[in-house]
Amino acid sequence: MAKKRGKKDPLWARLSLVFGALLLLVSGGTLVGGNLLLNHYSDQITHDGGLGDSAAGETIDGPITLLLVGIDERIGNEAMGARSDSIIIAHIPASHDAMYLMSIPRDTRVQIPASKSTKYKGGTDKINAAFQFGYQNGGGRGNGLALLAETVSNLAGGLKFNGAAIVNFDGFSGLVKALGGVHMCVDEKVTSIHTGWNKKTGEEGVPYNFNTDGIPTSLKPNMEPKVYEVGCRDFAAWEALDYVRQRDKLANNDGDYGRQRHQQQFIKAMAKKATSAGVVTNLFKVNEILNSVGQAVSFYNNKVSLADWMFTLKGIDPDKMITLRTNSGKYNSETINGQSFESLDENALELLKAFGTDTVGEFVANHQEMVANDASTPASTQSTSGR
């Protein structure tokens, strides 16, 4: 029963899929409409600031590193704050013909710098709290992003960013609809905790009961959850977005690591759809997509024009978008003072250094265990530990 979800989930905005959106702009600006479309939408998409002391020089002629962030933001209720539920580093080598994606687990234990403007004194916490400490007390998105960027920079040995982006769920949903959905391959059986239907009435609803920590417990009476079986097929927008939200009912019990992998696979699927002939040659569709990008993505461009970004990145082939498994896709947990944290293993830390020296290709060639499958091979054939 393929019904579109009617209920919006304000806790979702977790995907850092801006790179797919940027590639949409590349295709639209290059093949249909040129600078006219880019100039029209630039003010909607680009923002100043957002990188603080972690900003690179104002050029993208060499290697490029981007910080991509999906946030959990309570619109209209600033007191509830905002945390970054998805953090992805995207690196493009100086050749500008490939891209590497690495997720930072949101529970990673880090040292967060002080933020004078929001009266945060600095301290040790989970990395997803960095955005909140910069966002609070009127700091807003720009300061939240800047403090998160500085935190990631310190974790990565001083890595500098050429740009950053924040994704908004409601706008992003429109973007995927404008694309007409995507083709994806499910690499492990995934059961949705958010979408299901009543077997007697056919009405859509949330299928599970939850405990006070937001963990699903038992199925509600007569409810049947949406299940994504292993295999490749076309996904409607609502299906794709629901699928990449999931982390609790994954067959391999790989939780956040599974969700990170699925998010990265979705970026690649979007890029492929965005650069397909049926999209780039249709002026109406390009315009619709560009309008959706403006509503979905806040791009902090580090004073480099949007047109320069687009034409610099136009040579990236979606098939050369390499998704990487942090900690080889395995939990690396530790409990400190009763609180559970994730930590990055030696290879993950070395990979972060490789981003800064533009040696990711060589590093990955020697650490193939960190390359995520592209969903053509089920994850059940890989070694992944859960908890």
Image: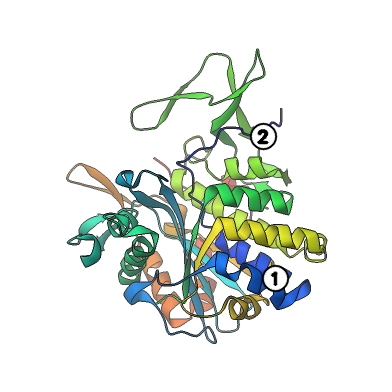
Tag 2 secondary structure: loop
Residue 50: image x %, image y %?
Answer: 40, 68
Colouring chosen for the image of the structure: rainbow
Q: Which residue is mark 1?
A: 37
In the rendered view, does 383 fall on the left or right side of 231? left
Residue 252 showing in the rendered view: yes
Q: Which residue is mark 2?
A: 4
**In the figure, 359 relative to 84: above or below?**
below
Residue 253: image x %, image y %?
Answer: 47, 39
Q: Residue at x 53, y 86 (%)?
A: 62
Q: Residue at x 21, y 57 (%)?
A: 124
In the rendered view, does 376 fall on the left or right side of 324? right
Residue 146: image x %, image y %?
Answer: 35, 67
Q: Nearer the viewer, mark 2 or mark 1?
A: 1
How far, Cα to Cα, is label 2 from label 1?
A: 31 Å
Task: Assign the C terminus to one quadrant of the image.
Answer: top left
Task: Assign the N terminus to one quadrant of the image.
Answer: top right
Mark 2 touches mark 1? (CB < 8 Å): no
Residue 184: image x %, image y %?
Answer: 68, 49
In the rendered view, does 244 fall on the left or right side of 386? right
For disc 1, the neighbor class at 10 Å (few under 14, some 14 to 19, many from 20) is: some
Q: Nearer the viewer, residue 5 or 252?
A: 5
Mark 1 residue type:
Leu
**In the figure, 384 relative to 308: above or below?**
above
Q: Residue at x 74, y 50 (%)?
A: 180
Q: Residue at x 47, y 40 (%)?
A: 10
Tag 1 secondary structure: helix
**In the figure, 64 relative to 25: above or below?**
below
For disc 2, the neighbor class at 10 Å (few under 14, some 14 to 19, many from 20) is: few
